[in-house]
Every structure is written in structure tokens, then in C-alpha cells.
Image (cartoon, helix red, strand yellow):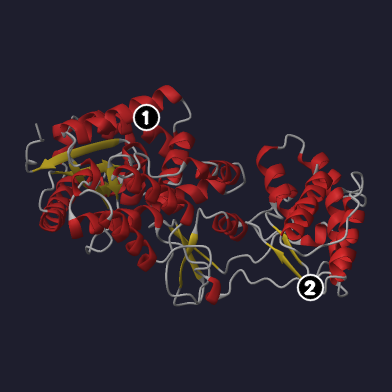
């Protein structure tokens, strides 16, 4: 099929350029040997006096396909890259044809930097430009470009079709896109984060078409990213990495991004380390460069809310593999933003989630562990801007759920939760003693009371700043405190404004 594809592209090339008046000589297509056809094409172009450029797109597709879907990876790999394999033959020919004057330039593009040494010995004539800072925004949109397009759409739409008018419509749309689609950096030396173009165009089409945002902010064309997370989760250390990314400020620090992968390393090496795991996620857009740390390492982060939703779904599936339990957990989570009732969700986390977390390293448990448990069940980017308030000085142990600008008509609450954690050692109790406590006895523990008081002050202060920023926010505020991985209790702070009729 690869030879058929090459032959078809050559036929199209000849047809197009002859139509444009170049009068290339007839080329004999060899259906059994596309390399022969390539050489005939080069001979035809040579007499024209023009240079020939060769573009090979998605050159790594074969490795990614085997990685994600092949049942017998070793057999399929050998078919492609063994001595007489199709890919090895093609790249060997490409190298030979570029060593002289027959092909002037070759552009090879792909998602992951799979090295070609597995395919053809010593393909060392290529120069990688992936991490060049000048190319950081080559395939993405800047915020300036995003704003210009939003302004154009708002200008050309009837205001009654929009969720807000004029400048407010522009700011609402730009802020929403920033939360969901911005955040990509492809060089440690670049200074501007860029927007995912596929997701932006998806948003523009919906917004220009009916004046509304997409119901689901993640384009279904990118849903295959879940397969990449599933692959990482299947590797040694993969699940721990996904959990740590959700817990630790959505980021991870490594020495540097790995510049290339051997195909055999991706498919068969069982000793992959964290640098490989994080670099793999980086190249597939599920992590991105955040910054260079003061000690000259590289911090990678989850780029935006659209991608964070993939992590939340994957982690929920990992921690709650039973679909009925997941459904029960999400039903309990709905009570929080539909009714302002935290009790069902706390009960679920205490009875179901804590059994899972109790098997992990208890020494590392903290507020972020608790937040992660709740976040995986509460995450809902169809209704909310989730955990997106970085511009207001905030703590990483709180969770904000602000209703999307296009969903404020709904009968749901905005939500702010402050999470606190008390170890059994701090409370001076055993797990058995903690389980025997009533809710009132649990809340009356000095260590729990102290955390509740601290959380109340924090959620009140931060809630006031949210209410000042959003004006029409209807905020349900909670302090949720866990005692080890055994008990959880909460306090509701104040009353939210009534829901719309």
C-alpha cells in the first residue's frame, strides 16, 4: 500500500504540473516498484531545470500505529524495518537520491522524533529544527491572532445571537479559549505560549456559525490522545506519573526533553524512565514546556483545560475501573453543583476512593491527594471553567468551578472548595479509631477543627475575590477535610445566591 501511495502521488504531481504548463515527459508508473517510479520522476524533472522538493509527512505514523493498535508489535515492526522491509527500502532510496543533485531538499515532518537509524543505516543527512525558538509559533496561533478572529466574528454576527454584546462578547470568548486551548511551548527559549490550531478552528466554526461556543470544548479529532495516556498508563511508572501530574500543580520536572526515540526503544524497551514517559507525552501534545527551572532543568505541564480533562477521565478510570462505581461517583458529584449538597460526594470518596488511595504511599498524602480524588469526579468542562483562576493569587489546594460564560443561564452553582488533610498521626488516632467516630466527634477533634477554621478563612477571602471579579457568580463555598484515608467531613460556608428561574 505504501508503494501504491507513492505512485499515486507521483501521478498527481505530473498531472498538476503539466496542467500548469511545465510539459513534463511521460513517466512510466511501475506498480510493483515505486522506487523505480521515483527515479523516473527525477529524470523527468531534471530536464525541466527546476529543483525537486520531497515532503514526507507523518513519517513516524508507522511506529505510532504499531504502538497504539498492533496486537503483534514485534512481527509488524520486523515487516517494516527488516533488511528488505518496505520502509527501509524507501528511506534508503531517499538518502541515495538526496546525496547528489537529484532531490534538492527533503522535508520530513512527524509528531514524535523517531530516529531513522532503525529504518535505514546511518540516515544522518537530516537536521532537526523542532526546538528552534523561531519556529515556536509556526503551526499554532498567537493570542493576538485569536483575538483578531474573535473580533471579526463578533463584528459580523447579529448581537442577539451572542451570549453577550460588543467588547464583553470578545473578552468572554478570548478568556474561554485561553483556558481551554492556550499553553503550548515548543522551545525552552521561546517566550510566547501558543494556541492549539485544530481546537481553535473547531471553536471558530461553531462561534461563527451560530454565535455559541462548542458544547464540548475538545474536538473529537483529538480524542485519540486518550490512547496515548492509556499507553503511558500501561508502562512501569506510568500510572504514578499521571497521578503525580494531577496532584503536583499539573507539572513535572525532568533534566530535559528527550530529543529522539529509537523505534525499538518505544516498542520493546521495558526500562523506560520518567524522562522517556514525560517526553513522549510532550511530543504528543499532552504535556508542554512550562519553563526552565532555576537549577536549569525543564518543567513540563499540562497545557490547558481541554487536555486536563483527558487526564481527569483517565485517572478516574484507573482509580475506579468499575463503570457502575464511576457512574455513582459522578452522580454524587452532580449534587454539589446542582443542589449545593456536598454530603453524597464526601460519602462516596470516603467509602470508595479512600480504599484505592490507602494502598498508595501514605507518607506522600496531602491536600493535593484529596483534591485529586474530588477533581476526577467533579471535572466537567461542558459547564465549567475548571480550576482556571491562576491570575488571582490562590492556593493549589483549592478547586474552582466557574460556570462558562455561555452556560450562565443554567440552574447550577459556581463552586469553590478548599481541601485540608490531617494525618492519623497528627490526630493521635489509629485507622480503626477514626472509623468509629461519628461525624460530630470527627469535627470536634482539635486538629480537624484547626484545619476547618483555617480553610474557612481562606475560602471566605478567596470567594470574595471571585465574587468581585465575576459580579454575577452564585458561589457555593466548602471546606473539605480528610482524616488520613479513612474519614472525610465538610463545612458549607455561607449561602449562595438563588438559582435562576
Tell me if I can see residue 388 in this picture: no
Residue at image position (79%, 56%) is 14
Residue 305 % position (x, y): 37, 51
Tell me if I can see residue 244 in this picture: yes
Mark 2 to mark 1 CA distance (whole Å): 69 Å
Secondary-structure class at tag 2: loop
Q: Tell which residue pokes out farthest to the top in this image.
A: 324
Residue at image position (40%, 25%) is 325
Residue 447 % position (x, y): 19, 48
Left or right: residue 430 versus residue 281 is left
Image height of 438 relative to 270, above or below = above
* Image quadrant containing the N terminus: top right
Q: Between tags 2 and 1, which lies in front?
A: 2
Residue 155 % position (x, y): 26, 57
Secondary-structure class at tag 1: helix
Q: Pointers 2 and 1 in contact (CB under 8 A)? A: no
Whichever of labels 2 and 1 marks the residue nearer the N terminus, that label is: 2
Quadrant assignment, res 142: bottom left
Image height of 77 relative to 278, above or below = above
Residue 352 numbered mark, or none: 1
Image height of 496 relative to 41, above or below = above
* Image quadrant containing the C terminus: top left
Residue at image position (28%, 48%) is 385
Amino acid at each position: 500500500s505504501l508503494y501504491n501511495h507513492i505512485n499515486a502521488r507521483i501521478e498527481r504531481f505530473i498531472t498538476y504540473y503539466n496542467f500548469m504548463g511545465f510539459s513534463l515527459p511521460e513517466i512510466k508508473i511501475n506498480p510493483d516498484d515505486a522506487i523505480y517510479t521515483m527515479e523516473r520522476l527525477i529524470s523527468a524533472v531534471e530536464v525541466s531545470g527546476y529543483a525537486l522538493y520531497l515532503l514526507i509527512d507523518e513519517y513516524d505514523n508507522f511506529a505510532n500505529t504499531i504502538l497504539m493498535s498492533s496486537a503483534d508489535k514485534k512481527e509488524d515492526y520486523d515487516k517494516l524495518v527488516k533488511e528488505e522491509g518496505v520502509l527501509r527500502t524507501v528511506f534508503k532510496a531517499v538518502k541515495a537520491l538526496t546525496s547528489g543533485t537529484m532531490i534538492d531538499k527533503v522535508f520530513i515532518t512527524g509528531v514524535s522524533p523517531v530516529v531513522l537509524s532503525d529504518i535505514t543505516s546511518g540516515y544522518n543527512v537530516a537536521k532537526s529544527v523542532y526546538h528552534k525558538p523561531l519556529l515556536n509559533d509556526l503551526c499554532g496561533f498567537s493570542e493576538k491572532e485569536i483575538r483578531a478572529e474573535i473580533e471579526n466574528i463578533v463584528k459580523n454576527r447579529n448581537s442577539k445571537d451572542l451570549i453577550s454584546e460588543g467588547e464583553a462578547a470578545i473578552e468572554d470568548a478570548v478568556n474561554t479559549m485561553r483556558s481551554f486551548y492556550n499553553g503550548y511551548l515548543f522551545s525552552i527559549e521561546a517566550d510566547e505560549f501558543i494556541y492549539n490550531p485544530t481546537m481553535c478552528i473547531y471553536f471558530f466554526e461553531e462561534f461563527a456559525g451560530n454565535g455559541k461556543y462548542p458544547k464540548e470544548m475538545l474536538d473529537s479529532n483529538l480524542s485519540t490522545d486518550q490512547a496515548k495516556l492509556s499507553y503511558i498508563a500501561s508502562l512501569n511508572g506510568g500510572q504514578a506519573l499521571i497521578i503525580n501530574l494531577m496532584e503536583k500543580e499539573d507539572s513535572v520536572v525532568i533534566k530535559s526533553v528527550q530529543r529522539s526515540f529509537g523505534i525499538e526503544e518505544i516498542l520493546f524497551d521495558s526500562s523506560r524512565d520518567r524522562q522517556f514517559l514525560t517526553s513522549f507525552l510532550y511530543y504528543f501534545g499532552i504535556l508542554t514546556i512550562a519553563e526552565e527551572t532555576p537549577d536549569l532543568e525543564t518543567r513540563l505541564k499540562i497545557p490547558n483545560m481541554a487536555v486536563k480533562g483527558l487526564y481527569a477521565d483517565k485517572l478516574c478510570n484507573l482509580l475506579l475501573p468499575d463503570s457502575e462505581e464511576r457512574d455513582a461517583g459522578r452522580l454524587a458529584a452532580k449534587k454539589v453543583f446542582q443542589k449545593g449538597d456536598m454530603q453524597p460526594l464526601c460519602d462516596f470518596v470516603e467509602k470508595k476512593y479512600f480504599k484505592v488511595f490507602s494502598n498508595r504511599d501514605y507518607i506522600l498524602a496531602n491536600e493535593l491527594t484529596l483534591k485529586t480524588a474530588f477533581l476526577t469526579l467533579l471535572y466537567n468542562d461542558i459547564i465549567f471553567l475548571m480550576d482556571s483562576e491562576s491570575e488571582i493569587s490562590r492556593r493549589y489546594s483549592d478547586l474552582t468551578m466557574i460556570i462558562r460564560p455561555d452556560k450562565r443561564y443554567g440552574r447550577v452553582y459556581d463552586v469553590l472548595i478548599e481541601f485540608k488533610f490531617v494525618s492519623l498521626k497528627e490526630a493521635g488516632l489509629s485507622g480503626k479509631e477514626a472509623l468509629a467516630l461519628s461525624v460530630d466527634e470527627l469535627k470536634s477533634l482539635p486538629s480537624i477543627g484547626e484545619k476547618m477554621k483555617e480553610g474557612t478563612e481562606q475560602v471566605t477571602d478567596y470567594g470574595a475575590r471571585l465574587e468581585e471579579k465575576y459580579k454575577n457568580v452564585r458561589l457555593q463555598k466548602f471546606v473539605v477535610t480528610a482524616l488520613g484515608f479513612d474519614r472525610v467531613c465538610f463545612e458549607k460556608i455561607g449561602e449562595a445566591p438563588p438559582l435562576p428561574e
